Amino acid sequence: MAGLPPSARLRRAADFAALRNATGRWQGRHFALRWIASLQACPRLGMAVSRKVSKRAVMRNRIKRVIRETFRARYDRLPALDILVIARSSAAASDNQALREELDRAWRQLQALKQAAAPGTIGG
């Protein structure tokens, strides 16, 4: 299984700070997503899984693995957005399947944004 290329990851503090005031938001039981249009040609992922979610690093890393795995599966179908996935404390108590299902719903909604015509294009 191939990892995400560096171009598909949010790394700089400024990128995360820009998402703090993002207008694109999605709320679920285990995750909250924020997104803004990216200047890059591909979607980029950032994750926030704090110690409030779980004090155990093993649990936080499990949640991050699930996030990366589901993002990687939908990567080529997502629009060029900077996406921040924020885990909630309920994510630590849930099994991987429940986390995957919720993230798949979120990715499908973001995928629908790609279908809408961008302003200034033909049909937009």
Image: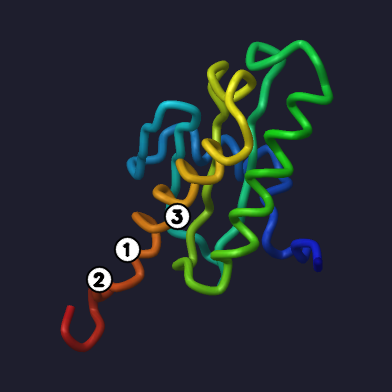
How far, Cα to Cα, is label 2 from label 1? 5 Å
Q: Amino acid at mark 2?
A: Ala
- Badge 2 marks a residue whose secondary structure is loop
Mark number displayed over residue 96: none
Q: How many marks?
A: 3
Q: Residue at x 64, y 31 (%)?
A: 48
Horizontal and vertical percent position of residue 89 = 57, 16
Give the residue at mark 2.
Answer: 116
- Secondary structure beneath dot 1 equals helix
Q: Who comes first in sequence, dot 3 or dot 1?
A: 3
Above/below status of 22 relative to 56: below
> Crowding at label 1, few (<14), some or many (≥20) Cα neighbours within 10 Å?
some
Q: Nearer the viewer, residue 2 or 50?
A: 2
Kind of residue indicated by mark 3: Trp
Residue that appears at 57% across and 41% down: 97
Mark 2, other Cα within 10 Å: few <14 / some 14–19 / many ≥20 = few
Q: Are marks 2 and 1 in contact (CB under 8 Å)?
A: yes
Question: In the rendered image, which residue does mark 3 sit on?
Answer: 107
Front residue of this view, candidates 3 and 19: 3
Give residue 6's position: percent from left, percent from top.
Answer: 78, 61
Q: Earlier in the sequence, mark 3 or mark 2?
A: 3
Above or below, comparing residue 96 to residue 58 in the picture: below
Amino acid type at circle 1 is Leu
Query: Which mark, by number, is residue 113?
Result: 1
Residue 114 percent across, percent down from the top left: 35, 70
Q: Which label lies toward us, 3 or 2?
A: 3
Query: What colour scheme was applied to this rendering of the protein?
Result: rainbow
Q: As drawn, is 29 to the left or to the right of 47? A: left
Q: Quadrant of residue 49?
A: top right
